[in-house]
Image: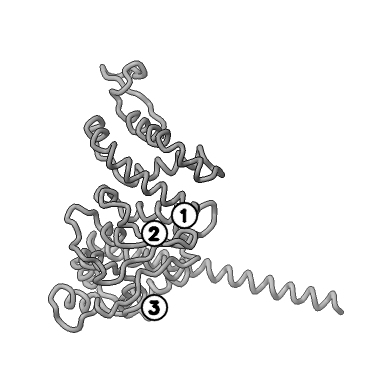
Amino acid sequence: MDVLQLSASLVLLTHSVYNFKLASTIINETSNANIADYRRNLSNRQRRTFDKAAKETVRMKGSTRGKLDIIRNVNEISPQEFNDLFKINKNLNQEGVRYSFAPDGKGFLLNGEVQTTGAELRASVQHNQGGNVLGKVSQPIPGSHAGSGRLQLGGVNQVSRLIGPLPTSHPRQEPSTYAAGVFALELSSVIVGGVVFVLEKYGRIIFEHVINAESFESLINTMANQLDPEVFDYIMKLTRTFMDSMLEELTSVLKFYISTESVLYRILVYIVRNFANIPFSVIADHTGEIIAAVRAYFISLNPNAFPGLLQRCPNCIGYFSICPL
């Protein structure tokens, strides 16, 4: 009798798990199809805003629940709503506010807290009509949901460590030379091993040369999840030092733009490859070596740097070299 009852329980459990997995698959496949169809009918401007809201929704709610919230909204929201948000995107970045789809299919959530519509928000921000919608936002940008699938490293879902700025917390206007979203990142903080680091303390030169805010944020989150606090702080300071001392020379030689993300990434890769599981005090003793190695990497991107290593092109009169990436 015990064996029979155990077998029956296992059958029911297996059946339930299978049904759950099947339901999740159906939800994902249906959601992806519906979202793709809706997105296809939007203009380029509307599509950019829709993608931003969709990514933020999945980041906050996780893949399955986030996609359900998106589906609820695409059945209710007019494409004009995305035009309204596009018009005030810079204002939202300045205030450290992100928008996601509301769970009831009726508009957007600001920092996961204040519900509004695109029309209401634009009227408030751009035309000072109605209530002060942004003034109601009291929470920073929420962290990522563990099931959002963002920043997957080695199959493990990583959680965002960034703490967004509070509205009206910045004492200055966004520099006109900053890429979209960079100013909000500069005013943010990051938690590394329980230690909070204020990003703007690392100097404006780091943020002036960020090309893509999302790529820079991904690097920061990756470092926060993988490194000890002192190593994180060291790499950020070393990036600032490299940008201060090497950027002008490298730009004049290479004749192309060098972004903060590329410098930060090359420093991180060199340290991970050469100083894994080594105490921080030892890494700090090799600061000159690290800077020299990263500089050599960028110099190697110059096809005219080492004539002896150049190869003659068999199809034209020019020369070329192959550099490691």
Mark with earlier residue (3, 2): 3
Mark with earlier residue (1, 2): 2
Give residue 244's position: percent from left, percent from top.
27, 42
* Outermost right residue: 1
Q: Nearer the viewer, residue 98 or 149?
A: 98
Q: Specify the amino acid type for callout 2.
A: Phe
Kind of element beneath mark 2 = strand
Q: Are marks 1 and 2 in contact (CB under 8 Å)?
A: yes
Q: How is the image coloured?
A: one colour
Q: CA distance from mark 1 to mark 2?
A: 9 Å
Residue position for label 3: 103
Residue position for label 2: 197
Residue position for label 1: 229
Kind of element beneath mark 3 = loop
- Give me the residue at 21% from left, 66% from top: 171
Q: Nearer the viewer, residue 291 or 211?
A: 291
Is residue 75 toward the left or the right of residue 208 in the image? right
Q: Specify the amino acid type for callout 3.
A: Pro
Q: Nearer the viewer, mark 3 or mark 2?
A: 2
Disc 1 crowd rating (10 Å Cα; few below 14, some 14-19, many 20+) is some
Vertical placement of 164 versus 223: above or below? below
Q: Nearer the viewer, residue 56 or 258?
A: 258
- Give me the residue at 45% from left, 61% from top: 195
Give residue 54's position: percent from left, percent from top.
36, 66
Disc 2 crowd rating (10 Å Cα; few below 14, some 14-19, many 20+) is some
Q: Quadrant of the C terminus?
A: top left
- Give me the residue at 48% from left, 63% from top: 194
Vertical placement of 69 versus 233: above or below? below
The quadrant holding residue 110 is: bottom left
